[in-house]
Image (cartoon, grey):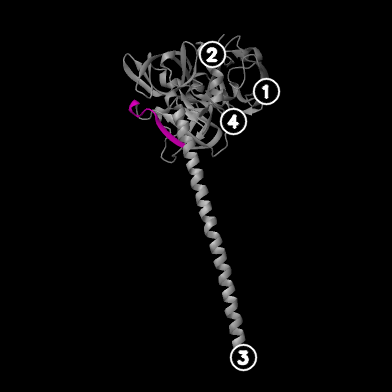
């Protein structure tokens, strides 16, 4: 009798457990289905946004070819960022056009036109070209990279591997902001620049081309790419707000004014240069920039800085080499006063320097 009762209770318990499990299973299936549907809808919405943005901006992006005596010396990408009653204005990278004496731009419909180089700056790696207004099809909208969050979807349009691949679109995300990388200027890696990092595929022919957000606004100018075996998917772009600060002057053909110290720079590991100037470093020097020449009547000379001094700081920022020194120095404007810290034969000195103008 007791065994039958126990068996009945056990059977009822198993029945209820099974019913509860079935209830949760039945409830889970529509929840999972709803989740899948939401994911698909989100994907479809994003794809729709991107394709619409590409349609709006595709005709504003141009392939650029630079020639020297009819020889092709540079290929890249640019974009029409402005127009007036007479001209359309194109932005690109300086290194794309700086070696040539004749520049042509080709639109998405294969129409080509000769462009005029209004101005460029190799340190900012920005160039401005103009074309007759009748050739302008579309003009991009300028955005702001500061508004972006890490992980934001981005896309690029460019000319990788030659003009036959013009208009190539690649997609990725914003991988990092405010990265500081070293770039080569005139064969020397002594220049640093602030960049956006993205995993959007960027190849050499993309240089000068636009990096867009999902609204189809330009938030960067594709400029650099790390190409080493250990690293893949790391592209770099100059933030558009950094580029725009130079554009008005370049449109007018004016040189960019930068602060001037009147000094020659030597890295502490440039043994031959130190030998030429007869400079022997103190044992306390393990980083900084050595001054190999001080120009008379220059700002550094007037402040009391001497040949052989090792600059270790600009205001509160330490400087380890020439690239970092220039990066920190060019954060200031001509006419500003800064404090330069130097190591002079083991003794630390601070000097107030009023910066000169590189254009004067």
Residue 149 x/y as whole percent: 58, 36
Label 1 element class: strand
Marking on residue 1: 3
233 drawn magenta:
no
Q: Is 129 placed left or right of 152 in the picture?
A: left
Quick check: is 165 in the magenta stretch? yes
Q: Quadrant of the C terminus?
A: top right
Question: Badge 2: few (under 14), some or many (20 or more) residues near its Cα, within 10 Å?
Answer: some
Q: Earlier in the sequence, mark 1 or mark 2?
A: 2
Element type where label 2 sits in the image: helix
User: In the picture shown, does residue 63 fall above or below 27?
Assistant: above
Residue farthest along the left direction in this orientation: 70
Whether the residues at callouts 1 and 2 have beta carbons within 8 Å, the answer is no
Mark positioned earlier in the residue sequence (3 or 2): 3
Mark number displayed over residue 146? 4
Residue neighbourhood size for the residue with mark 1, other residues' Cα within 10 Å, grouped as few (<14), some (14–19), many (≥20): few
Give the residue pinned by disc 2: 249
> Between marks 3 and 2, how big is the CA–CA gap?
102 Å
Q: What is the C-alpha distance between the residues marked 3 and 1?
A: 102 Å
> In the rendered structure, which segment of residues is drawn in magenta?
163-171
Residue 5 image offset from top left, x and y in percent: 62, 86
Location of the N terminus by quadrant is bottom right
């Amino acid at each position: 009798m007791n065994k039958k009762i126990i068996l009945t209770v056990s059977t009822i318990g198993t029945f209820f457990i099974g019913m509860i499990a079935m209830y949760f299973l039945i409830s889970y299936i529509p929840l999972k289905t709803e989740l899948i549907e939401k994911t698909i809808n989100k994907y479809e919405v994003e794809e729709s946004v991107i394709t619409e943005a590409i349609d709006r901006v595709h005709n504003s992006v141009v392939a650029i070819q630079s020639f020297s005596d009819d020889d092709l010396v540079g290929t890249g990408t640019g974009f029409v960022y402005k127009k007036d009653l007479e001209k359309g204005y194109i932005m690109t990278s300086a290194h794309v056009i700086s070696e040539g004496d004749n520049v042509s731009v080709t639109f998405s419909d294969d129409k080509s036109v000769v462009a005029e180089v209004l101005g460029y700056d190799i340190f900012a790696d920005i160039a401005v070209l103009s074309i007759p207004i009748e050739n302008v099809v579309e003009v991009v909208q300028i955005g702001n990279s500061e508004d972006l969050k890490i992980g934001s979807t981005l896309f690029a349009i460019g000319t990788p591997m030659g003009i036959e691949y013009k208009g190539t679109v690649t997609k990725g995300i914003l991988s990092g902001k405010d990265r500081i990388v070293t770039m080569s200027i005139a064969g020397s890696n002594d220049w640093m620049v602030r960049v956006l990092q993205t995993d959007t595929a960027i190849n050499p022919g993309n240089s000068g081309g636009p990096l867009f957000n999902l609204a189809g606004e330009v938030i960067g100018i594709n400029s650099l790419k790390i190409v080493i075996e250990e690293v893949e998917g790391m592209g770099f772009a100059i933030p558009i707000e950094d580029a725009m600060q130079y554009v008005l002057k370049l449109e007018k053909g004016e040189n960019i004014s930068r602060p001037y110290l009147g000094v020659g720079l030597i890295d502490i590991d440039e043994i031959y240069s130190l030998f030429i100037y007869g400079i022997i470093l103190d044992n306390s020097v393990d980083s900084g920039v050595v001054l190999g020449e001080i120009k008379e009547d220059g700002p550094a000379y007037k402040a009391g800085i001497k040949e052989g001094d090792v600059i270790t700081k600009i205001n509160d920022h330490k400087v380890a080499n020439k690239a970092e020194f220039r990066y920190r120095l060019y954060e200031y404007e001509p006419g500003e006063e800064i404090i330069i810290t130097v190591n002079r034969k083991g003794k630390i000195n601070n000097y107030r320097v009023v910066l000169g103008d590189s254009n004067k």
